[in-house]
Amino acid sequence: MTGAGNEVPNDTSGARTLGIGFDDAGVGRRPVGLFRRKKARPVSQDRGADRADLGHLENFVQTRRGVEAFIEPRTTVTETTVMLIADDGEWTRRRIDGPDGARRFAHRMGIPVYDVRLMGYPQRMRDYNERRKRRPELF
C-alpha cells in the first residue's frame, strides 16, 4: 500500500518517527519531516499590564517623594516594564503597555521618564539595595 507523500516504505513496527530515507535494508516506511513548519510562537509568554499594575504604580508615585520612571525594554521573557525609583532609592517594577504607555503614565503622573538603556539605573537604587541586603530587618 502506498501512503501519503511524506512517507517512505518501512515494514517494521509501523511507529511514526521523523527521518529521511529508508531503513538499513533499503525498505520501510517512515514519515519525513522536511517541510513541516514550526508554529510561530509569541515573543513572550508573559501577560501585559492590567489595572492592578497601574494602581500599584500610581500608589507608589503618590506615597513617595522624588519618583522617576525608567522604561525597561521588552525581552523574550517579559513584556515592557517601568521601574519607579523614589528619592531614597526605594523602587518598584511593573508591566506597562509598551514604551509609549510608560511615557503616557509618567506624563499623567507628572514625573520624569528615562530609557534605562540610555541612562542606566541611578546610584541611589543600588545604594538602597545594598542597605536592604545589610539590614533586612529595617525594611
Image: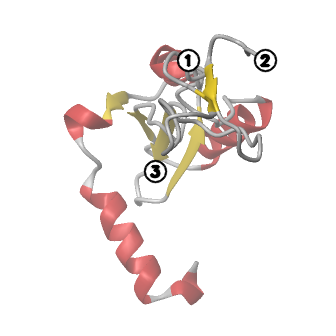
Which marked residue is nearer to the observer: mark 1 or mark 3?
1
- Is tag 1's residue or tag 3's residue first in the polypeptide sequence? 1
In the displayed structure, does residue 17 sit left or right of residue 70? Answer: right
Q: Quadrant of the C terminus?
A: bottom right
Depth check, mark 2 against mark 3: the one in front is 2
Q: Which mark is residue 1?
A: 2
Q: What's the CA distance linking mark 2 and mark 1?
A: 27 Å
The image shows residue 94, relative to residue 41, as above or below, that is below
- Decide which of 63, 135 is in the foreground and name it: 135
Where is residue 128 shown, x and y percent of the image? Answer: 39, 68
The image quadrant of residue 32 is: top right
Label 2: element kind: loop
Q: Quadrant of residue 29?
A: top right
Amino acid residing under circle 1:
Arg
Sequence-earlier tag: 2 or 3: 2
- The type of residue carrying mark 2 is Met
Look at the numbered disc 1 and give the secondary structure of its residue. Answer: loop
Front one among 6 and 107: 6
Q: Which residue is mark 3?
A: 86
Give the residue number, with chain letter if any, for mark 1. 37
Horizontal and vertical percent for residue 88?
41, 60
Label 2 crowd bin: few (<14), some (14–19), many (20+), radius 10 Å: few
